[in-house]
Image: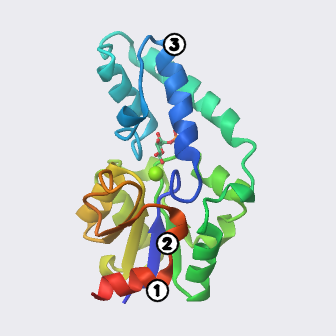
């Protein structure tokens, strides 16, 4: 029986995946590296430092910068990203998410956040939904980020639930891999291609609802 949901944030609850992309693209351009949306799929769910490494590798510049310079580049991206998230309001919840989160709470199920983003708590507050979450996994506490299962395993533990009692929801390939590796039921939001490894998927957040997911788990 399902007792809790563990959500990714960026690209599932609100469209900050787009802001991450815009901020990375700007930084990459400055470094003479051109990234597109297809490449960006690989960055979804991945920590700030790992994302920078992937971009530098892609541009053939993995040896160009010192650790200190890489830290500065990651900070620069984060500053640009933080400019973009200042104006987030509850209206920026993705379609159907306010209803879906309310439905979960009304059914007395637990709610956890498993986001790789250190900006996650700020965004939850801006969206006006911080109080709905029973727990938030601190990404700084993790030994390994997505696709490692640690973040979802920890989320379940923090909720006081077992793995089979939880459902994980993600928009990133690395995120689905993380949920699956934890042994949890995975729900993907996105294209059939990106979500090919999820247990079930929907194209849009508006299609998420409790009954549909519970039915799919039973069948
Ligand atoms: C994930 C995003 O949720 O958080 C990634 O999908 C992002 O794109 C990662 O890089 C880390 O976020 P932040 O805000 O700590 O740089
Ligand atoms: Mg995401």
Question: Would residue 192 be found to the left or right of residue 125 on screen?
Answer: left
Q: Secondary structure at mark 1?
A: helix
Q: Secondary structure at mark 2?
A: loop
Q: Are dots 1 and 2 in contact, CB under 8 Å? A: no
The residue shown at (41%, 27%) is 52
Examine the rendered structure and indicate whether residue 53 appears above or below residue 30.
Answer: below
Report if residue 149 is visible in the image.
no
Query: What is the quadrant of residue 178 in the picture?
Result: bottom left
Q: CA distance from mark 3 to mark 2?
A: 38 Å
Which residue in the protein does label 2 denote?
208
Which residue in the protein does label 1 denote?
211
Q: Nearer the viewer, residue 129 or 34?
A: 34
Instruction: Find residue 210 and report its horizontal and vertical position in percent.
Output: 49, 82
Q: CA distance from mark 1 to mark 3?
A: 47 Å
Query: What is the quadrant of residue 3 in the picture?
Result: bottom left
Q: Are dots 3 and 2 in contact, CB under 8 Å? A: no
């Amino acid at each position: 029986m399902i007792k809790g949901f563990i959500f990714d944030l960026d690209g599932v609850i609100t469209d900050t995946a787009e802001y991450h992309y815009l901020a990375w693209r700007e930084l990459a351009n400055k470094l003479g590296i051109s990234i597109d949306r297809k490449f960006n799929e690989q960055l979804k769910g991945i920590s700030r430092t790992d994302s920078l490494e992937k971009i530098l590798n892609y541009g053939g510049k993995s040896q160009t910068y010192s650790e200190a310079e890489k830290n500065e580049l990651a900070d620069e991206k984060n500053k640009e990203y933080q400019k973009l998230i200042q104006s987030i309001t509850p209206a920026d919840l993705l379609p159907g998410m306010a209803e879906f989160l309310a439905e979960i709470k009304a059914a007395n199920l637990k709610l956890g956040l498993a986001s790789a983003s250190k900006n996650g708590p700020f965004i939850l507050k801006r969206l006006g939904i911080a109080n709905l979450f029973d727990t938030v996994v601190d990404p700084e506490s993790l030994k390994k980020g997505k696709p490692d299962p640690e973040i979802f395993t920890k989320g379940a533990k923090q909720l006081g639930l077992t793995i089979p009692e939880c459902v994980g929801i993600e928009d990133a390939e690395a995120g689905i891999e993380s949920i699956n590796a934890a042994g949890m039921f995975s729900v993907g939001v996105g294209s059939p291609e990106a979500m090919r490894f999820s247990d079930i998927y929907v194209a849009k957040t508006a299609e998420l609802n409790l009954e549909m997911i519970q039915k799919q788990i039973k069948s």
